[in-house]
Image (spheres, helix red, strand yellow):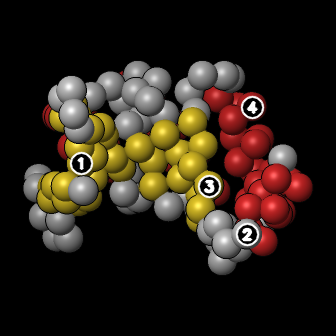
Amino acid sequence: MRQQIIQKIETGFNCIKLKIGAIDFQTELNILKFIRKEFSVSDIELRVDANGAFDPDEALEKLKRLSEYQLHSIEQPIKPQQFDDIAKLCHLHPEPLGTSSVRDMNNTMLHIFVPIQGQQDSIQKLSR
């Protein structure tokens, strides 16, 4: 894996997005730990996509553990359309969270939810 990352950096890549949630969570954390130990934030940007694998009741603890690895963002930590739960997570977790919440036959629209500074009960939706 290390050599693959080095090759990607040498060819101009500066971001890695990993799918998580399919194997043991501690194993996934160990992979992130290895990458971050070898490659700093200035070397490579890390993003993860949990594909809705986290239960809303355990998501915050997992997000806290993931934040130890200086991730750019965490996409879809919980299943789509759980707007109250994602809003709560946004207020309790400082890093940007995304959810692929709108899907149709032609397009997937990514929404990134971020807390609005100084407003505990408000979130801002940034569509991309």
Quarter of the image where the C terminus is located: bottom left
Contact, mark 4 vs mark 3 (Cβ under 8 Å): no
- Give me the C-alpha separation between circle 4 and circle 2: 28 Å
Marks 3 & 1, CB-CB < 8 Å contact: no
Question: Circle 4 sits on which residue?
Answer: 27
For marks 1 and 4, give the one nearer the viewer. Answer: 1
Mark 3 and mark 2 lie on one chain; the one further toward the N terminus is 2
Q: Can residue 11 be seen in this snapshot?
A: yes
Of residues 52 and 66, the one nearer the viewer is 52
Residue drawn at 36 percent across, 29 percent down: 78
How many residues crowd around disc 2 within 10 Å: few (fewer than 14), some, or many (20 or more)?
Answer: few
- The residue lying furthest to the bottom in this view is 42
In terms of image quadrants, where is residue 106?
Answer: top left
Which amino acid type is marked by label 2? Thr
Q: Position of residue 62 (x, y in %)?
A: 52, 37
Kindly identify which residue carries mark 2.
11
Q: Residues within 10 Å of mark 3 (few under 14, many from 20)?
A: some
Q: In this view, does 115 lie to the left or right of 14?
A: left
Tell me how far mark 4 sits from mark 3, CA to CA.
17 Å
Residue denoted by label 1: 111
The vertical placement of 15 against 52, above or below, is below
Decide which of tag 4 and tag 3 comes sooner along the chain: 3
- Distance from disc 3 to disc 2, alpha carbons, whole Å, reads 13 Å
Labels 4 and 2: the sequence-earlier one: 2
Q: Residue at x 27, y 52 (%)?
A: 112
User: Could you tell me if the residues under marks 1 and 4 are in contact, i.e. CB atoms within 8 Å?
Assistant: no
Q: For residue 16, which numbered disc appears in the image?
A: 3
The alpha-carbon separation of the residues under discs 3 and 1 comes to: 20 Å
